[in-house]
Each structure stands twice: as C-alpha cells, then as structure tokens.
Image (cartoon, rainbow, N blue to C red):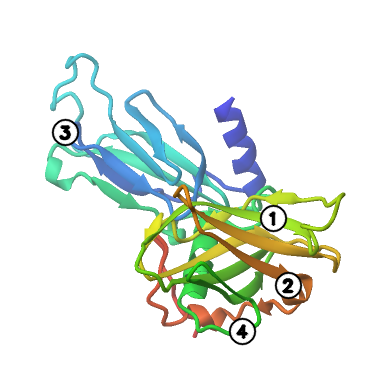
Amino acid sequence: MKTKILSIILCALGFSLCASANEKILVNHEVTTHIVMPENIKLVDISTTKIIGNQCADNIVRIKPFMESDSIHSDGYKENELLGTVTLIGERHIAQYDIVYTESPRYAASIYHVSYQHAESYINPEVSMPMSEMARYAWAVYGSNRKYNQVVSRMHGMKAVVNNIYSIGDYFFIDYSLENKTKIAYDIEELRVKLTDKKEAKATNSQTIELTPVYSLNLAKKFKKHYRNVLVLPKLTFPDEKVLRLEISENQISGRLITLAIEYEDILHADGFDSDILKGTSYYPHYYINYTPKP
C-alpha cells in the first residue's frame, strides 16, 4: 500500500527516479544513521530488506544495514555497495537518497540533515503551513518588539499582556507575556483557549467553544518572574459579543488563574507578517532550517 501511495505521489510530481542521481548516505552496521528532515515526515519508503529502520520522531528516521543473526559480517557488504534507496515524504517536500555501505564506521553518517536543495516540493492540500515553517515564524514573532498595549490583565500579583497578534497564511500568531510580581514561582498547569460571551458570568444561556492551538512555542511549565509564549490558532471570525479568552491556570490548590480577553476588534487589526522580520533574527526553531536572504 505504501509503495502504491508513493508511486502516485511521484507520478503527480513528475518526479523521475532515473532522471538524476540521488544524494548518497553512507552507512555501516556499527552506526545507526539518523536522517533529520526540516519538516514533519508523513511517509517513509525503504526499497530493500538490506536496510532496516523506523520513524523515531516526527521529523527523524533512523536506519541501519540489516544483519541477520550475524550471518552477514562486516565483509558481507562490499565497500560502496548500493543497499537500496530511502524516500521521505514530508508535509510539503519529498527527498530520496541512495544508501551506500562503507566498511569504515567513521565514514558512516550518524546524523544526516535533509536540505531543501536536495528535495522536491509538492502541493499537499492537507497542510497549509508545515510545522517547521510555523515554528520559524513563531520564533521570529517571539523575538520582535511589542506593538500592542490594549490587552492587559492584572490579578493575583500577576500581569498578563498581549504583545503582538500576527496574521500569517491561515493562522493567527498570538504573542503574550506573563510577569510574576510575587516571590512565589508560577507553575503552569494548563492553557485553555475559549471563545466565550463577553458577559459570560451573567448569561444564562452562554455558549463557550474551546479551541485547540495547533502550535505552542514555549513548553516551559514553571517560571519565577518572566514568561513569554507564541500561540498559533487557525484563523477564525466571531461576532462582536464574543471574546477570545486565554486562561492560564496554576498547578496549586489555591492556583492563580490568569485571563486575557482578546476582542474581535483586536483580531481585525492583526498585523500582516513582514518577511523582513526573519532577517537577522537570532531565534530559530528546533528544526534544521537554512535561511538565505533574497538578493
């Protein structure tokens, strides 16, 4: 089934396996090779039983030459022997590599980073923005200066503020900060995003819709004084009598609840993202990404 899916995608791309030589990855039976793709991997195809492997993380595949009960020793595979090919299909790109055996473990790749230069792009209607791209934008927003001043909340010795709201593609990037003015560290239990009525407490038939962020940049669960995070939500519209509410609760019996209410007017004034914000930034996601400024 995987082979059939792979063939369909390759044909749709006009990707000819024989059109050009693939990049080579050197492997050895004493080394586990980790192939890191700059976006989440949707499908992995290994063309031969001479190679074993699995997907060990969202964007990482590990492979190794197959050794059956030590019946194949180090001299079982010859130097520069082509063991097969590995094809990686990501959210927006596809890459294929020739897996070549080397008798010297020191020449085998333990970590191999996939470059977009060696990958073909394809249209995936299910992915409007790859996670790696989303992370990169979030890091850029995280490192940008605060532009918003109107969404501020103070309670329990805590101050919460929305720094920026950006509209990028099909998503809103909400950049917010927390400041702890007490001497007690804040333990984050959970973050909830809700679409609620403005007068929720007084409404007898109020409706609350819980939203799930597609990405959260800062996964820290505890801070002493300062905390900043960027949440990514699918674009949405809502009536004026509703508010988008961020609720951060503390992991304590007498937990402090922090609430930020974002009105629709604030959403309407979300900034379009300026690609120049990516230039010169020192913030990069935990994915391997090359950025080459346009001339």
Whether residue 265 sits left or right of residue 292 in the image: it is right
Element marked by disc 2: helix
* First-in-chain label (2 vs 1): 1
Q: Report, in whole angstroms, how far the alpha carbon at label 1 lies from the one at label 4.
A: 21 Å
Mark 3 or 2: in front is 2
Q: Report, in whole angstroms, how far the alpha carbon at label 2 lies from the one at label 1.
A: 14 Å
Residue at mark 2: 267
Question: Dividing the image into 4 quarters, which one contains the N terminus?
Answer: top right
* First-in-chain label (2 vs 4): 4
Please name the residue shown 66% across and 53% down the image. Answer: 123
Q: Amino acid at mark 2?
A: Ile
- The mark found on residue 149 in the picture is 4
Residue at mark 1: 194
Q: Amino acid at mark 1?
A: Lys
Q: Measuring from the top left, give residue 157's x and y in whole percent.
A: 47, 71
Whether residue 172 sits left or right of residue 285 in the image: it is right
Figure check: 147 above or below 104: below
Q: Measuring from the top left, give residue 46's x and y in whole percent.
A: 43, 32
Q: Report, in whole angstroms, how far the alpha carbon at label 3 lies from the one at label 4.
A: 57 Å
Residue at mark 3: 30
* First-in-chain label (3 vs 2): 3
